[in-house]
Every structure is written in structure tokens, then in C-alpha cells.
Amino acid sequence: MTAEGRSHLKTGLNDFLKSYCVYDVSLRVTDIYEAQTDAINGAPCMRTQLTYDGSSTRIVKRKESVSAWNSTWDL
């Protein structure tokens, strides 16, 4: 993991976060983006990808990575 990725993860432990969820056609969460509440468009954020067991709601895989926040996701 890059230093930038580690820095973002450390920040998430002590600050408030905002998140955005992406759903598939079965209304299961497939991606979760998390960033500091003051993150602007393009700021680093954490992306969690979820994979399910067939058509069930049982999560079988999860992958975390660094991504970029999209300001259209803000409240």
C-alpha cells in the first residue's frame, strides 16, 4: 500500500467520514466509498468492493483500495 493510502486509513480512525454506496440490480451493496467529511472532488478516499455468493446476500469477498471522491456524492 502506498503512503497516501496508509495516511487516508489513519485519518479515518480519528475523524468523521462520509460515505457513498453503489447497489446492483438486486439492491445489494457492491461498492462503498468513504472519505473525510471535508473531502473535495478528486480527494483520496477508500473504496470497499463486495462480492456475493451467487444471487444470495452472503458476502464472500471484500477488497479495499484507494480511490477518488466524487463531489456529486455529497449531501
Image (spheres, grey):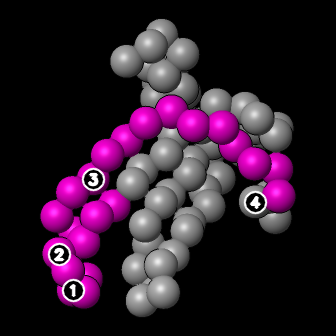
Q: Which residue is mark 4?
A: 73
- The span from disc 4 to disc 3 (Cα, nearest Å) is 22 Å
Q: Quadrant of the N terminus?
A: top left
Q: Which residue is mark 2?
A: 53
- The span from disc 2 to disc 3 (Cα, nearest Å) is 12 Å
Q: Which residue is mark 1?
A: 56
Do the residues under discs 4 and 1 have CB atoms within 8 angstroms?
Answer: no
Q: Which residues are magenta?
A: 50-72
- Residue depicted at x 44% and y 13%: 2
Type of the residue with mark 3: Arg
Q: Position of residue 11 (x, y in %)?
A: 54, 27
Do the residues under discs 2 and 1 have CB atoms within 8 angstroms?
Answer: yes
Asked if residue 53 is among those painted magenta in the image, a careful observer would answer yes
CA neighbours of label 2 inside 10 A, class few (<14), some (14 to 19), many (20+): few
- The span from disc 4 to disc 2 (Cα, nearest Å) is 28 Å
Question: Helix, strand, or loop for circle 3?
Answer: strand
* Pair 2/3: label in front: 2
- Residue depicted at x 51% and y 33%: 66
